[in-house]
Image (spheres, rainbow, N blue to C red):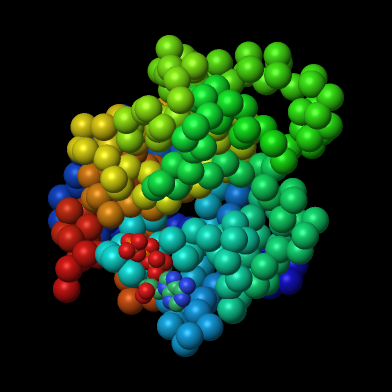
Amino acid sequence: MEAAMEHVPVQKTDGPRPGGPLIAPLARAPAPSSGPPIIRTHGLAKTYPNGQAVFAGIELDIRANQRVALIGSNGAGKSTLLKCLIGLLPSTGGEIATLGERFTAMPGPAQMKRLRRQIGFVFQNHGLVGRQSVLTNVVQGKLGLPGSWRAWHQGIAPRAWREEAMQVLAEVRLADKAGARADQLSGGQAQRVAIARALIRRPRLLIADEPAASLDPAVGRDIMRIFSDLAGEHGITLVYTTHDMQHALDYSDRIVALKGGKVHFDRPTARVSRREMDGVFHG
Ligand SMILES: Nc1ncnc2c1ncn2[C@@H]1O[C@H](COP(=O)(O)OP(=O)(O)OP(=O)(O)O)[C@@H](O)[C@H]1O
């Protein structure tokens, strides 16, 4: 495995621009493509047990501090790929190295434990516990981290963790809702709590599956901006899936497009043309 992974090619980040004009330049320079590796794959493939082949031959090399948008039309395999990369679904071919854990198919139990400690997740249906307060939901992001259960049961946790939870709630501009029940929040507010719950884990890698899909456009942009800004400020690598071309263009340094079970293109966002984006979803 070690030897094979060394042959994973480093993504080219320059070279001739494919046809069409550039779209909206990035507000800041793209993250360097030479930072420490966060996710690498070699020949990654996934076929579901019912025979549905989703992708094959996927080569990825995602580096620290990059914000990566994974795009593709309905059923292209974005969620499946995301879940394989972090060991939530077994892949059926190839190799993965995520946060230094190398595995085929699925990580082993010890690897999974180490991965979980370093990854924050945000999904479309935020997964908050509705009858609990916003603060409690955020504090629960700590559970599963080393020493957390002991701290929780010995009653050490509440004070320090609540302070930390208030800090991350302030970062998503929701400190004033700390005492509210989670089921009394709007969709956008609930998603901000889900981000705070992921952030309190101090993850190296933040994974978001369609984080803005069920929100109205202005709220969706707000959520994407919060993600992107916080990932930048905290030095967290962000990988998110989206159907929304503009969300991919505005909030990533790099776009990976899936089409027909392959990586259709993978390059810095500033070098992606409107025509190429259209080609991912049509034709
Ligand atoms: N558990 C499963 N068993 C069999 N096939 C599945 C399963 N989950 C997903 N698929 C199929 O795998 C393909 C990829 O699905 P996936 O959800 O990864 O795509 P996606 O790009 O995230 O789609 P969307 O944008 O609609 O969420 C689809 O054809 C889907 O029907």
Name the outermost residue toward the bottom: 51
Q: Is residue 143 left or right of residue 175?
A: right
Frontmost residue, 99 versus 26: 99
Q: Is 38 left, or right, of 31 in this rendering?
A: right
Q: Is residue 23 left or right of residue 67?
A: left
Q: Position of residue 128 (x, y in %)?
A: 49, 38
Where, by quadrant of the figure, is residue 275 drawn?
A: bottom left
Depth check, front residue: 9 or 136: 136
Horizontal and vertical percent for residue 102? 71, 62
Label count reads 0
- Residue 72 versus residue 201 in the image, above or below: below
- Residue found farthest to the front: 131
Hey, which quadrant is residue 270 in on the image? top left
Vertical placement of residue 77 versus 128, above or below: below
Q: Quadrant of the N terminus?
A: bottom right
The quarter of the picture where residue 73 lies is bottom left
Dividing the image into four equal quarters, which quarter contains ligand 1? bottom left
Q: Is residue 169 visible?
A: yes
Which quadrant holds the C terminus?
bottom left
Q: Position of residue 217 (x, y in %)?
A: 20, 38
Residue 7 appears in view = no
Task: Give 30 or 42, whichever is nearer the viewer.
Answer: 42
Residue at left offset 55%, top offset 22%: 135
Work out whether 164 lies above or below 111. above
The residue positioned 74% from the left and 22% from the top of the image is 157
Residue 19 locus on image (x, y percent) = 18, 60
Taking the spot 29% from the left edge, 45% from the top edge, the residue there is 214
- Residue drawn at 51 percent across, 37 percent down: 129
